[in-house]
Amino acid sequence: MHNENLPELLSRIRQGEQSAAQALVNQLYPLVLKIVRNHLPRREAEEDLCQEVFLKIFSKVHQFRSDVPFEHWVSRIAVNTCIDHLRKQKNRPEYRWSDFTEEQQAALSNLREGATLPPERSPEEVRELLFRLMAKLKPDERLVIQLMYLEEKSVAEIGNLTGWKTSKVKVTAFRARQKLLAAIQRVEK
């Protein structure tokens, strides 16, 4: 959001002006929706979660300091809201080898052996497969895998986005990879 009038817009929002709030929602909605979609394993309740993010943004708008970019502040609220939502769910289903298609089984075998996925695999197939396996992870681990491997963010970027130290990001990523590998091995048995 490259709005030169952001301080004025935020001031109008703090005064309770509805049109300013609607203008901000219109500008931020694509960013918030992208974050929510990237952090939910399924397309369930994404509108509700976006609405919750905006409620938090408006309830905390008085806390915004202009020493950080507004988009980063909003992104952090959105990511934390997604983490909270995933923690509440605690939905970690068990998968059996027979639950996966032959193509997914081949991809899992390749991943377990450290090979890359075949180039003919579509990004959507890979994403679906990863999300099924990531459902077994804790919300923090899911977030790190999502940001690191699906959104290709660096350890430093993940640290900035989550507020974690780089050591926590690295340890969380390591543990998540170990759990994913163990999940692949359990599924194959």
Image (spheres, grey):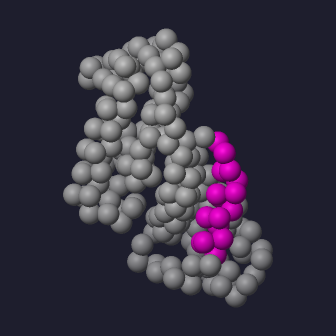
Does the segment drawn in magenta span residue 55?
A: yes
Q: Residue at x 49, y 29 (%)?
A: 95
**Is residue 18 at least partly visible in the picture?**
yes
Question: In this picture, is 170 found above or below 2?
Answer: above
Task: Give the magenta range.
Answer: 43-58
| Quadrant of image for the N terminus | bottom right
Position of 10 relative to 75 (above/below): below
**In x, y percent, where is residue 3?**
58, 67
Q: Position of residue 143 (x, y in %)?
A: 42, 50
The image quadrant of residue 169 is: bottom left
User: In the image, what residue occupies the spot 30% across and 23% down?
Assistant: 112
Instruction: Say if 139 sits above or below 160 in the image.
Output: above
Q: Residue at x 74, y 68 (%)?
A: 22
Q: Is residue 116 visible?
A: no
At 32% across and 63% down in the image, what residue appears?
A: 164
Residue sitting farthest toward the top? 102
Q: Position of residue 42 (x, y in %)?
A: 60, 40
51 shown above or below 112: below
* Side of 13 where 120 appears, left or right: left
